[in-house]
Image: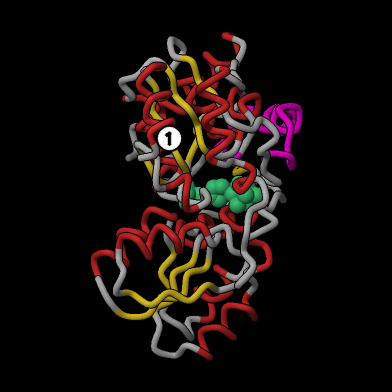
Amino acid sequence: METELAKLKAERNAVILAHNYMPKEVQEVADYLGDSLDLALAAANADAKVLVFAGVYFMAETAAVLNPDKLVLIPDPSAGCTLVDSITAEDVLKWRARNPNGVVVTYINSSIEVKAVSDYVCTSANCHKIVEAIPRDRPVLFVPDRNLGAYIKYVTGRENLEIWSGTCYVHERMTRDVLYSVAEREADAELLVHPEASGTVDLLREGRLRVRVLSTQGMVKHVKERGRGAFIIATELGLLDRIRREAPEARLIPALEDAVCMYMKLITLDKIKRSLRELVYRVQVPEDVAKRARAAIERMLEFR
Ligand code: 13P
Ligand code: SF4
């Protein structure tokens, strides 16, 4: 690792947690690299005084809630997410008022205030297991991703599942037609799809193609286990950099050549160094909100 960064990390007793969509040079300096679930677990077990979160804001908020005694920093606090912006805590509370017996399951891509009014937080790696474990007679609200919600409904066959209408602007463009067209062009390749992709459920329902629906970490694991062969990767391009490093003999085809999350790419190596040098930008969550959000996040951690 670069000397200046190594020195700063040692001085601050810091670790860098990075999401799989980070730019390549950030992935290369990460102490923990993973999907949202891995990073929540790494944050919960991290042995350091300072956590630098190389990812988007909601991920750093989750790390802050799980580590009230640590200093959690995000190199650029404007790293947002279209899913987070699609729903407020008031929206959830209105549903709760109409459904006193209801259960709210919230994707980790949400604000800490929304998590605080939820029963469960989930990630793409464990959402269907969590919904499956809720008694069938209780109505469920899933927020905020409509594509992941549709996937959960398809897998669990649950009728009393209401779904919010948020979307990820990157995965929304991975439609049924886009996925069919790349799969036709690359007929020998295995198709790996993130459940935020808008075409996921259409493909599963139509059953014409063999599709594997996986979280980003699930895709890394799958390609590494195969070792070689061709894979269509229907998610953000940062993940392809990671897989290329760890499974160099595999041939990767992006479902969309320009699937780039502008929010993730706001995090750079220079900003990470500045974060450590100046101890900015601190992520803090008021304790009353943190306490309620923590309960919903910890319920999720039981479903690894
Ligand atoms: P995972 O890495 O948890 O699969 O989620 C992807 C994502 O879109 C995060 O913004
Ligand atoms: Fe949000 Fe989509 Fe970017 Fe993930 S890829 S952070 S879901 S906007």
Residue at mark 1: 17
- The answer to whether residue 226 is visible is yes
| Residue type for callout 1 | Leu
Q: Quick one: quadrant of the N terminus?
A: top left
Q: Residue at x 52, y 13 (%)?
A: 291
User: In the rendered view, would you say 247 is above or below 139?
Assistant: below
Tell whether position 65 is magenta: no
Above or below residue 296? Residue 168 is below
The percent coordinates of residue 132 (x first, y second) are: 42, 47
Residue 242: percent from left, percent from top = 40, 57
Identify which residue is drawn at 52% across, 30% down. 273
Give the x, y percent position of residue 127.
46, 46
Quadrant that contains the C terminus: top left
How many neighbours does mark 1 have within 10 angstroms: few (below 14), some (14-19), or many (20 or more)? Answer: many
Q: Quadrant of residue 11?
A: top left
Range covered by the magenta-colored residues = 84-109
The quarter of the displayed image where residue 190 is located? bottom left
Q: Is residue 97 magenta?
A: yes
Taking the image as shown, residue 162 lies to the left or right of residue 1, namely right
